Amino acid sequence: MKMTAQEYARRVKKVGPHSPLGTDCLWAFGVGGGICLLGEVLRQRYLALGLEADLAGTLTSCTLIALSAVLTTLGLYQKLAARAGAGSLVPITGFANAVVSAAIEFKTEGRILGTGAKMFTIAGPVIVYGTLSAVVYGGVLWLLGG
Amino acid sequence: MNYFWAFVVGGGICVVGQLLIDLTGLTPARILTGYVVAGVVLSAVGWYAPLAEFAGCGATVPLLGFGHLLAKGVRTALQEEGAIGILTGGLTAAAAGVTTSLVCGVVCSWFGKSHDQN
């Protein structure tokens, strides 16, 4: 049977798992907001310890990343992500989850080309294009200022 | 009030991501990459720093905040070190987060077993 790409996409949508937009967004809002709230609680703790604002922010990110790594190793973050969608993807914990789950998943392909390479599948593009845009921005600033 | 706005702004940023997933079918890798680049742009035009001031981790924990961190790093390094800051500022600012992720990835791969994604 021949069908066009549009027809195929339409059929996949019809047969595939049904996820109402409203429910998805509510989960994303609750879980994503919750992770940010947890971050803010941590940050206020670090500030209360007398740390500088920048350092407190950095430590907050590192704590969230480590927490996400532990939950990913235990297989719990994936369970949350199945429901929370972007709520667990967009925060820094989702970035950490992408790195750690690939590192674990691909260790069967070896330490170097499995874990070492595959952990960059999602982190790589993020770092590459983030850095690239930052350099472009810096270049523009420099030309304007210099 | 800090906590309330961290929750609402952070949740709102995630809802935008969810809408992108559901309505455009963008893959997670594209969304994360887009968020970081968007964060650099929003920081460059001067909109993200006030949001981060207002919402704290609600703005800095989502990946948009990672972009903001890169842009802020370049901006600061450019002022303090001159043109070389264009090359050093971004990743220097992001070093702690990236390094923690990579170290956690390798260490966790020693202990973790592959789990079913569901």
Image: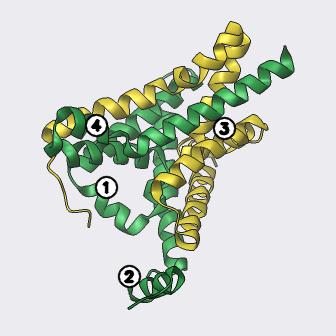
Chain colours: A green, B yellow
The amino acid pointed to by label 3 is Val
- Mark 3 → mark 4, Cα distance in angstroms: 25 Å
**In this view, the mark in front (2 or 1):** 2
Q: Residue at x 78, y 24 (%)?
A: A141
Secondary structure state at the residue bearing disc 4: helix
Q: Which residue is mark 4?
A: B105
Element assignment for label 2: loop
Q: What's under tag 1, amino acid-wise?
A: Tyr
Q: Disc 2, disc 4: CB below 8 Å?
A: no
Q: Residue furthest front?
A: A2
Judge left or right: residue B95 versus residue B41.
left
The residue furthest top is B81
Residue type at mark 4 is: Gly
The tag on residue A77 is 1
Residue where numbered disc 2 is placed: A17
Residue bearing mark 3: B40
Q: CA distance from mark 3 to mark 2?
A: 35 Å
Using a 10 Å C-alpha cutoff, classify the residue at mark 1 as few (fewer than 14 neighbours), some (14 to 19) or many (20 or more). Answer: many
Snapshot quadrant of residue A132: top right
